[in-house]
Amino acid sequence: MILRTILLTMATLICSVALCGAESALVDEKDISSVEERRILVSIEDEYAKLDEVEEKIDAREMELKTLEMEVDKKLEAMQKLRNELVKLLDRKDEAEGERIGELSRIYEKMTPQKAAVLLKALDYQLAVELLLGIKKKTAGKILDSLDAETATELSKAFTEIPVKDQSGY
């Protein structure tokens, strides 16, 4: 019965404190009727103090997380700018290579098919394909005709397997 009275008193106090928003000064010497009630009120005050500490820690952590989030956003933005610059540089590099290959194709086109075939066979496979792509079809046919059958077949297959460049940027 005493325990029930204490619990009801404690519940009433907690409710009145929650309604009033008062977190301090629960222990008022005038309102305390027993040692047990005083002990419970002191315990409640201690819990409020602990909750305040936890709330302060949570608030500090939230501020820290917001700061970190802003830093991450800035770094992502900087990385996106660098990525865009890199894509532009790679596009310029590809364009310059394409121009040089185009010029080299015109040089090979002006050679005799036999001489062009000998030089083409000594080149890197991918470069040879790209050069043949830049040469007029009639001249490229004569060059392929001057190559040995195996090399001509490999280069001919390459024309059907030429990948289309991905324009998505990824």
Image (spheres, rainbow, N blue to C red):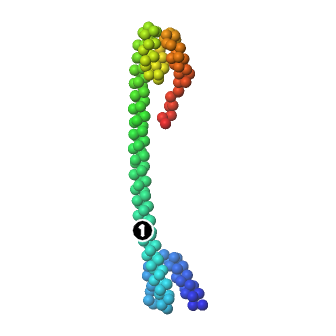
Q: Is residue 27 visible?
A: yes
Q: Is residue 134 visible?
A: no
Q: Nearer the viewer, residue 99 or 154?
A: 154
Residue at 41% across / 13% down in the picture?
A: 107
Q: Nearer the viewer, residue 168 or 120?
A: 120
Q: Nearer the viewer, residue 166 or 29?
A: 166
Badge 1 amino acid: Glu
What percent of the width, then of the height, locates residue 139?
Answer: 49, 10
Residue at 43% across / 76% down in the picture?
A: 49
What percent of the width, then of the height, locates residue 25?
Answer: 43, 82
Q: Secondary structure at mark 1?
A: helix
Residue at 47% across / 22% down in the picture?
A: 125
- Identify the residue at the far right of this view: 1
Quadrant into which the N terminus falls: bottom right
Could you tell me how many numbered marks the image carries? 1
> Considering only vertical position in the picture, is 73 above or below 55?
above
Residue at 44% across / 16% down in the picture?
A: 120
Image quadrant of residue 27?
bottom left
User: Are there few (<14), some (14-19), or many (20+) residues within 10 Å of tag 1?
Assistant: few
> Considering only vertical position in the picture, is 85 above or below 157?
below
- Identify the residue at the far top of this view: 112
Mark 1 highlights which residue? Answer: 56
What percent of the width, then of the height, locates residue 75?
Answer: 40, 47
What percent of the width, then of the height, locates residue 58?
Answer: 44, 65
Image quadrant of residue 3?
bottom right
